[in-house]
């Protein structure tokens, strides 16, 4: 019978912690049915119940660091996001974005009656207990008992306690009001005083049970301590009786919870994602607001489950009702995984993208978006990071700034804008303190002078991230180059490729892995030819700005027409953006 | 006779039973009372000290083969089919040869070896000594299986804030790692005073049982710029920092199934080590991979 009870327990809800045990920025070590949990509350109030091991080397996450938004493993500093439990950063490879699928196992969490409820695979809702509904409750100190569930259950039915107001009164009469496998409701009456209590049983293992008592009704503040003492004493005596009884029974076998293996693709070295220009997510516009002159903010929430993990610098494709697809950077800070926040500037010469979002799309509308993709990853191994943003280019930079600020890394954010009213997301800017420097109303010449000052003092292991309008980006890159910044320390993201694409050439491409030779005629892109021949190519902006459609070049000389690769990378000639770039040689061999 | 040994020790890996393992630092023994320890699940009593040392099994007082080398007492539960590892550096006269950092850890010895091979944890576990945030990157390095059937990692580089007790400022330190036996691992590290020479640390891990080990380090450091007390202090500090992390690994035994944990490029040496253990059919201290 004991085994059946424990098997059934896998599909039930259990209290695994009291709400009080989840103290500010603490990580609690939860246990249930032989399994361990890392339980932590984020600053936004969300309670996370996760498998208690880091996916990397199995170190307990309950010794990890809760920074209010993410949980960091002590061993190698892997960071896991609030809610999704997706890995957002692997310090050993600061230039890569972690594979989205590195995600820890999560369990449901519901707070009720001052307790946190969870389970391996609980069905339905956590149990409602009529005795405790509609009243204040006082949760007692949890009492761990080295005895099996049944023994503790049997002893609890005979538990005797005094009502809250009658601790010193005549010996109370205690009756069992309710009794289930995992809880017992008792009522204690002494004279005019009556207190009802529910004792929940948390099966920690086959031979260990925690009693979590909850009293209906909150005793007066002064009496609280006496009530808690009273139950402590009585329950400690009950514990001794249980343990004496259990010691006479044969030792039950310990429960062996199954640890799920990681997915096949994670067992090897992680690879870059290869999904196409997809729009797998459906989001609702929860909020649309004017965040600055000509800039609208949009908060997107999932309509079916949890949004995937993003990293600072990531963008999403937004598929608009008018058929256009546009890329927008996620501005969120670390751990803000309940929604994506993006900023959209109204472009005067809009082809219909920004105009559609500003004029047609409303709160409550549903949009199709892609999963976040990160081609502008933020290193966190710099001695100092300079972030330079121009206008709406601030959006990816905001996500980076919040990540750096939160981890206490040295950085400066220089934000160039027309005037105060053009500063987007002032609520986020406010949180950045002294790290934020605004430069308002500068003309191109003044901007260049200012940049010269900012970039004058390059030191090894500094990194520069810049996003903004094309001309400002060019100026920043040239200035950095002139002042001795190495190419690999300068990271940039263009909104769009303003270069005129010359697609007049024709050439041959050979696909080394697919063993195919294809012709690319004038007026057609490599990407189009690949797709026409059944080769799937991931893409996003399709104009040479975002870097998603990159392919490796094995032979031949690429004719680069993109704005994603740096000059050094272009000279190296080993990568090509298949959406716009072409070939200078008659033949190009690609690693596809 | 041999099957009886296997039953008592609960270790079925003949390559481990017929090999030498460190069971004590010779300086820790005294002739007044026996020293108790355990090897591969077998309880041992070490009697005597100095020249008159012998080991017996606690259960039946049966004898155990012993040897002394590098300041350690070694035992073999079966019939040794190879010699104790030869370490040329331990015979070089311009080095200090230092023991005294032995530390018991509640985890499989194979996990302890893997931790010794790992650079990625330096900034987080040995903060301020072997690494420091934000210098967290593990540049790619080379791993191979040598002709002598060792796992060898070369061209390893890592930023180190305190290169030597007298150095100021960090340097990129060069490392090489070598696993020569399942429970034996060593590293070579650039000496800060003589860039053409390498300091050497061997780690002999005593498999107490499948979920407990004692790590016995042997340091062979060039004498310039340091002294024995300082080396011993540094080694004890580093191993004491590792201990609480290792004791929080779940499960305690090393899983050999590639899908049990998530390797990244920085873990290439661990990937090779686990594969090499599978190839040698090591099961003691491991969770074997499903076939």
Image: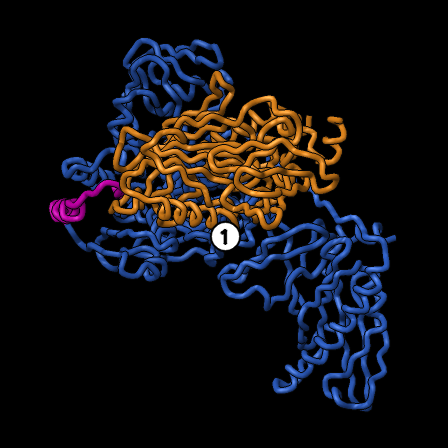
Q: Is residue A452 magenta?
A: yes
What x and y, as percent, mark residue B279? 60, 22
Q: Is residue B76 left or right of residue A583?
A: right
Quadrant of the image containing the C terminus of chain B: top right
Question: As rendered, which of A224 and A235 lies closer to the eye?
Answer: A235
Residue drawn at (40%, 16%), measured in percent from left and top? A590
Number of dots carrying numbers = 1
Q: Nearer the viewer, residue A443 or A181?
A: A181
From which residue to which does the magenta span run?
A443-469
Q: Give the SS element for disc 1.
A: strand
Q: In the current view of this chain or complex, which residue is farthest to the front?
A: B52
Tell me the residue at 71%/51% (across/down).
A34
Quadrant where the N terminus of chain B sits is top right
The residue sitting at 42% across, 51% down in the picture is A332
Subunit of mark 1? A
The image position of residue A556, as x and y in percent, is: 32, 13
Q: Magenta segment: does it hold A425? A: no
Which residue lies under the disc numbered 1?
Answer: A71
Q: Is residue A418 left or right of residue A223?
A: left
Please give the name of the residue rendered at 74% of the width and 36% of the height, measured from the top-left corner: B8
Within the image, what quadrant is residue A567 found in? top left
Give left or right: position of A225 versus A285. right
The hue used for chain A is blue
Task: Give the colour of chain B.
Answer: orange
In the depicted structure, whether residue A41 falls above or below residue A307: below
Give the quadrant of residue A113. bottom right
Q: Is residue A445 left or right of residue A434?
A: left
**Which one is in front, A9 or B40?**
B40
């Amino acid at each position: 019978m004991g085994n059946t009870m424990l098997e059934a327990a896998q599909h039930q809800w259990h209290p695994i912690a009291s709400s009080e045990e989840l103290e500010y920025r603490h990580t609690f070590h939860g246990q249930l049915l032989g399994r361990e949990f890392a339980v932590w509350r984020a600053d936004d109030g969300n309670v996370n119940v996760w498998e208690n091991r880091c996916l990397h080397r199995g170190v307990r996450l309950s010794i990890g660091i809760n920074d209010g938004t993410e949980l960091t493993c002590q061993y190698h500093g892997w960071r896991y996001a609030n809610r999704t439990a997706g890995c957002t950063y692997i310090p050993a490879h600061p230039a890569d974005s972690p594979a989205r699928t590195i995600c820890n196992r999560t369990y449901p969490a519901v707070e009720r009656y001052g307790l946190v409820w969870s389970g391996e695979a609980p069905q339905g809702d956590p149990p409602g207990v009529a005795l405790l509904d509609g009243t204040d409750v006082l949760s007692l100190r949890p009492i761990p008992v080295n005895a099996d569930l049944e023994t503790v259950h049997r002893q609890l039915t005979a538990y005797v306690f005094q009502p809250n107001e009658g601790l010193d009164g005549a010996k109370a009469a205690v009756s069992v009001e309710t009794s289930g496998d995992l809880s017992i409701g008792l009522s204690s009456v002494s004279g005019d005083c009556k207190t009802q209590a529910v004792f929940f049983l948390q099966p920690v293992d086959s031979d260990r049970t925690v009693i979590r008592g909850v009293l209906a009704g909150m005793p007066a503040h002064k009496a609280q301590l006496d009530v808690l003492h009273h139950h402590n004493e009585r329950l400690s005596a009950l514990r001794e009786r249980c343990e004496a009884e259990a010691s006479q029974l044969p030792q039950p076998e310990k429960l062996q919870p199954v640890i799920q293996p990681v997915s096949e693709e994670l067992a090897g070295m992680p690879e870059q994602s290869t999904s196409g220009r997809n729009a797998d997510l459906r989001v609702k516009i929860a909020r649309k607001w004017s965040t600055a002159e000509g800039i609208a903010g949009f908060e997107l929430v999932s309509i079916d489950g949890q949004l995937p993990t993003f990293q600072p610098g990531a963008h999403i494709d937004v598929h608009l009702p008018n058929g256009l697809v546009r890329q927008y950077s996620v501005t969120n800070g670390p751990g803000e995984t309940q929604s994506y926040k993006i900023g959209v500037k109204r472009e005067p010469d809009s082809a219909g993208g920004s105009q559609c979002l500003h004029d047609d799309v409303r709160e409550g509308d549903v949009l199709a978006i892609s999963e976040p993709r990160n081609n502008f990853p933020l290193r966190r191994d710099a001695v100092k990071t300079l972030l330079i943003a121009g206008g709406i280019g601030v959006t990816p930079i905001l996500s980076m700034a919040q990540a750096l600020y939160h981890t206490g890394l040295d950085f400066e954010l220089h934000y160039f804008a027309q005037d105060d009213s053009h500063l987007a997301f002032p609520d986020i800017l406010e949180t950045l303190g002294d790290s934020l420097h605004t430069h308002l109303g500068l003309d191109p010449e003044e901007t260049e002078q200012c940049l010269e000052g900012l970039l004058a003092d390059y030191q090894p292991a500094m990194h520069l991230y810049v996003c903004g309008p094309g001309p400002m980006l060019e100026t920043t890159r040239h200035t950095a180059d002139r002042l001795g910044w190495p190419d690999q320390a300068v990271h940039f993201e263009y909104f769009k490729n303003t270069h005129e694409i010359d697609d007049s050439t024709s050439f041959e491409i050979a696909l080394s892995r697919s063993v195919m030779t294809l012709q690319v005629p004038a007026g057609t892109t490599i990407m189009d030819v690949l797709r026409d021949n059944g080769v799937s190519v991931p893409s996003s902006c399709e104009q040479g700005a975002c870097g998603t459609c990159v392919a490796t070049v094995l032979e031949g000389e690429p004719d680069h027409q993109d704005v994603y690769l740096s000059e050094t990378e272009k000279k190296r000639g080993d990568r090509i953006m298949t959406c716009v770039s072409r070939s200078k040689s008659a033949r190009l061999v690609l690693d596809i | 006779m041999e099957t009886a040994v296997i039953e008592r020790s609960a270790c079925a890996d003949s390559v481990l039973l017929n090999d030498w393992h460190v069971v004590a630092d010779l300086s820790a023994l005294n002739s007044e009372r026996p020293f108790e320890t355990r090897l591969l699940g077998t309880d041992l009593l070490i009697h005597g000290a100095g020249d008159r040392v012998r080991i017996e099994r606690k259960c039946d007082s049966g004898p155990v083969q012993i040897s002394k080398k590098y300041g350690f007492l070694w035992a073999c539960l079966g019939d040794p089919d190879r010699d104790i590892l030869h370490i040329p550096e331990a015979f070089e006269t311009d080095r200090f040869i230092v023991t005294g950092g032995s530390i018991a850890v509640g985890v499989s010895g194979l996990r302890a070896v893997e931790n010794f091979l790992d650079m990625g944890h330096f900034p987080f576990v040995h903060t301020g000594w072997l690494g420091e945030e934000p210098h967290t990157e593990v540049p790619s390095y080379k791993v191979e299986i040598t002709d002598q059937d060792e796992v060898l990692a070369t061209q390893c580089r890592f930023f180190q804030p305190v290169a030597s007790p007298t150095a100021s400022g960090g340097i990129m330190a060069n490392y090489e790692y070598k696993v020569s036996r399942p429970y034996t691992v060593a590293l070579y590290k650039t000496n800060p005073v003589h860039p053409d020479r390498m300091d050497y640390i061997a780690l002999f891990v005593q498999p107490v049982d499948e979920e407990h080990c004692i790590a016995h380090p042997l340091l062979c450091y060039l004498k310039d710029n340091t002294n024995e007390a300082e080396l011993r202090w540094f080694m004890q500090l580093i191993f004491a920092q590792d201990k609480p992390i290792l004791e929080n690994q779940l499960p305690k035994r090393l899983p050999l199934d590639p899908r049990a944990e998530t390797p990244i490029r920085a873990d290439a040496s661990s990937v090779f080590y686990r594969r090499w253990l599978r190839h040698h059919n090591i099961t003691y201290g491991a969770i074997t991979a499903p076939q």
